[in-house]
Image: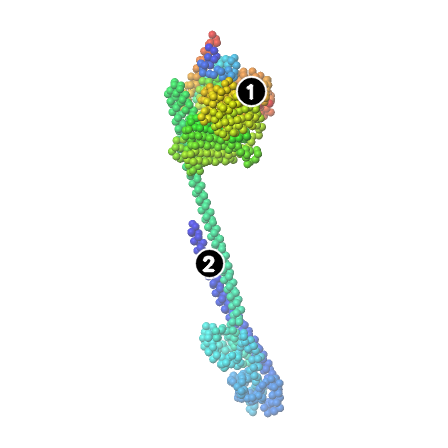
Amino acid sequence: MKNKTTRFLISSLIGVALLCVCVFSFFAVHMSNQSARTINEVGTLYMSSMSQQTSMHFESIISLQLEQLRTLTNTITSDEVHRDRALQEALVEGARARDFSYLAFYGSDGTLEMLCGAQLTVTDPEPFLSSLRGEERKVAIGTNPQGEKVILLGMPSPHEPTPEHNCAALVAGLPVSYISDNLSLEENSERAYSFIIRRDGSFVIRSNDAYRNNYFERVRVLYEDVNGITAEEYLKELDEAMTEGRDYANEFTMEGERYHLYCTHLPYSEWFLITFLPYGSMDTIVTGFSREWGGMTVFSGIIILTALMLVFYKYYGLTRQQLRELEEARASEEAARKDAEHANRAKSEFLSNMSHDIRTPMNAIVGMTAIATANIDDQQQVKNCLKKITLSSKHLLGLINDVLDMSKIESGRMTLNMDQVSLREVVDSIVSICQPQVKAKHQHFDVFIHDISTENVLCDSVRLNQVMLNLLSNAIKFTPEEGKIHMALFEESSPKGEDFVRIQIQVKDNGIGMSKEFMRHIFDSFAREDSARVHRTEGTGLGMAITKFIVVDAMGGDIQVDSTQGKGSEFRVTLDLEKADVMEEDMILPNWNMLVVDDDRQLCETTASALHSIGVNAEWTLDGESAVEMVVKRHQRQDGYHIILLDWKLPGMDGIATARRIREALGDDPVPILLISAYDWGEIEHSARDAGITGFISKPLFKSTLFNSLRQFTGSLTEEEEEEAAQGERGRDLTGRRILLAEDNELNWEIASELLSEEGLVLDWAENGQICVEMLNQSPPGYYDAVLMDIRMPVMGGYEATQVIRTLDRPDRDLPIIAMTADAFAEDVKRSLDCGMNAHVAKPIDVREVMRLLEKFIK
Amino acid sequence: MTLKECYAALGGNYDDVLGRLPERLVQKFVLKFLNDGSYDLLCRSLEAGDRGEAFRAAHTIKGVCANLGFDALLESSEKLTEALRDGAPPQPGEEELIRRVGEDYRRTVQAIQAYQGALGA
């Protein structure tokens, strides 16, 4: 594609360039020829007009002189002139006056009878004489005795020749210089010069440098080339033209220079005027013009070629760019296709993994069910089976939830449900969820809270839970037995402003870790490290993709991962959460002295500072032995601790042993000793109580955790809570309110009726939805204060009835409707609300709940 | 036979129901249970192949049992309700569920009848 286009471009460029060169060369050559021809034509034109002018000038000079001669002739009044001396004198006088150097009678026999001047000889008397005899004026050339040429003007005599005086004409002589001066034949010698010759080529008047007597001879010797023909041929042509009496033009080269030549016949004579013009003078102009023209042609040719080159170059560049873009587009398309293929493959792999993952718990469920059925009477066995079935079902449910979440994410339907969330509650619940798994794998699990001052934030608690749970369950899953899992929460100031707080969640383990290769894909959907040891671990491979989506895309946070294969992994989640807009409880405890015992110095410090902030004077120590010492010392000073917090897992002497020692030392002092633990204390509770432990406090130790756990030892509830409790009991008086109860079952109706009547309500029974709608519609507006609606009824169900009621044309159509049904699934609750019901209560009927809702919704 | 013994016999949770209802009412409703037609409706609907109506009937039994704290019948009727929900096609094991509901129902009715007899006596 690329080569083809380039080749085409280059060849067409060369073709066009060649065409340009050809066309312009043709024009240049043509113009050069044209200019040569033009020079010729212009030269010829110029020369002909110049020759004509010279010729006319010659004619006018000659005719003037002939006229002079004629007037002289007219003075010859008598035929006897040759005898009349006086007349001859007068004639000579007249000739002198008219500047004639010579004057003679010209006899019919050709003799010249001189009247004045020296004897002259006519050079070529024949044509001269015959013309004069024919009464024709004529000019001829003659020579004087000195050999000088003289122009002879012949005027036929007005008188008939007589025998004694055979006179044909009167002839006057003028020096040649007179003519040549008057004609100024050589005046312009540099440009052009002329001379006059006779038919035979002999010069009448010649130019300065013409040193030969005959022009023809001169031609033969000097002319190198006459426009492509030889000198002889030229002479022949010239001779022919002379004979025919027409003008003749040509060019020739003489002594290396080109000349124009023009030959024309002169009147009153047998003479010819030949004019030369050196080619150079005119050529310079025309050649200059022609050169300019040629230059222009070449210049414009170059410009056009350059423009063409430019256009081609640009076009070439464009083509290349297009090609490149095309290439890139194809490459990106290819990449996209590969991605799609990869995603596809990942999905099918995922499907096959999933079916494996689903099959495993399903097999367990089916198998356990079979075992339980076979041993239906062995209660222990059945219980064991049921426990395993429950576990497998939960696992299965988890898988399905993950898949559903992922599909929600992929279709963009996952949205956050922002609500006020207590970080303490979230972490508490996470810890309690994870504890059984941690315990089952004998892992060391620690939760750590660093100075969390803002416990209540705005967040989606379900999703936050999910994130932490995913991270923790991964850590548990990929950490072998006896491994360590550490979870920590930090609080920092948020760059988003004062209304926000930055929470960092850190989950660290010393498990199997991840390869670098895998870390790149850990947040991809359907990813799971492909190695044998991971194959044994179940999971969808969706957890991290979901986690990342929740943290990064939905919550705008950040997730980082650090891992070394075989050493463990660390995940850090950073979230900027808005502080919840609630007044934090005013948490103040009495000015107690407290002792915190934990082997983690940081925990001791943060717990002590948290206790200080709620008004408690706290001291801390790192091991059991020193704790016992401190307690005993204080006791002896009669300034004992009010409460002691003991970590369960301490180096050396553990929490329980320490407690036992303290009790022994203190005797019957009832100081409360609380055991701090991130673990489920169910198993140790008995031995702990035996050792004198008063109670338990669960990690993580939020400020509120401490406050709520320790408050019980203040001995009284706060005023606010008392008030709240009192209000709860009082309730609102709904006596006499009328309730319409839609319920198809008589027994259920009676139960509800009995229970609610005792609360002072008046109840009417509608046996199905249809009847319910009718009864409501026939009652005066405001007659019923609320409707309690069963969902599953014949004729018309509760959902439909609610929808009909909500569209009735009654002012009380939006009265409270509360669903009351044996269905308690979340979907049922949601559907009830979607249908326009105000609330949902599940059977069995709990009068307090129903009353609470009625109180809430009845105006 | 006391009401408590009756509850033990029919697999119910007497303490739970007393948490919600006064003993006087519990006695009254337990006896009324004998007249409840939901089980008959369930049997008829199943025979007629009307699974929608059967679902509603099972559902009603479930509701009544929830109210009265008849946990054994509640559990079996609840399972049957879910099996019949949304007109789901018959599944293997459904017969077993129906049989279980019948068994629990008869056990409940027998216990109540025994209690009724004891009252009369």
Q: Is residue A611 above or below residue A56?
A: above
Q: Is residue A550 above or below residue A766?
A: below
Q: Position of residue A670 (x, y in %)?
A: 52, 19
Q: Is residue A777 visible?
A: no
In the rendered image, the residue lying farthest to the left is A374
For disc 1, the marked residue is: A715
> Marks 2/1: CA distance?
108 Å
Q: Position of residue A173 (x, y in %)?
A: 57, 85
Given the image, what chain letter belongs to the residue carrying mark 1? A
> The C terminus of chain A is located in which quarter?
top right
Q: Which of pointers 2 and 1 indicates the residue nearer the eye?
A: 1
Mark 2 and mark 1 lie on one chain; the one further toward the N terminus is 2
Q: Is residue A90 visible?
A: yes
Element assignment for label 1:
loop
- The residue under the point 53% across, 34% down is A492
Question: How many numbered tags mark residues here?
Answer: 2
Q: Position of residue A530 (x, y in %)?
A: 40, 35
Front position in the image: B121 or A711: A711
For disc 2, the marked residue is: A17
Same subunit, tags 2 and 1? yes
Q: Residues within 10 Å of mark 2 (few under 14, many from 20)?
A: some
Front position in the image: A205 or A545: A545
- The residue under the point 57% across, 35% down is A497
Q: Are marks 2 and 1 in contact (CB under 8 Å)?
A: no
Element assignment for label 2:
helix
Residue type indicated by callout 1: Gly
In the rendered image, the residue lying farthest to the top is B121
- The residue under the point 45% across, 49% down is A323
Q: Residues within 10 Å of mark 1 (few under 14, many from 20)?
A: few
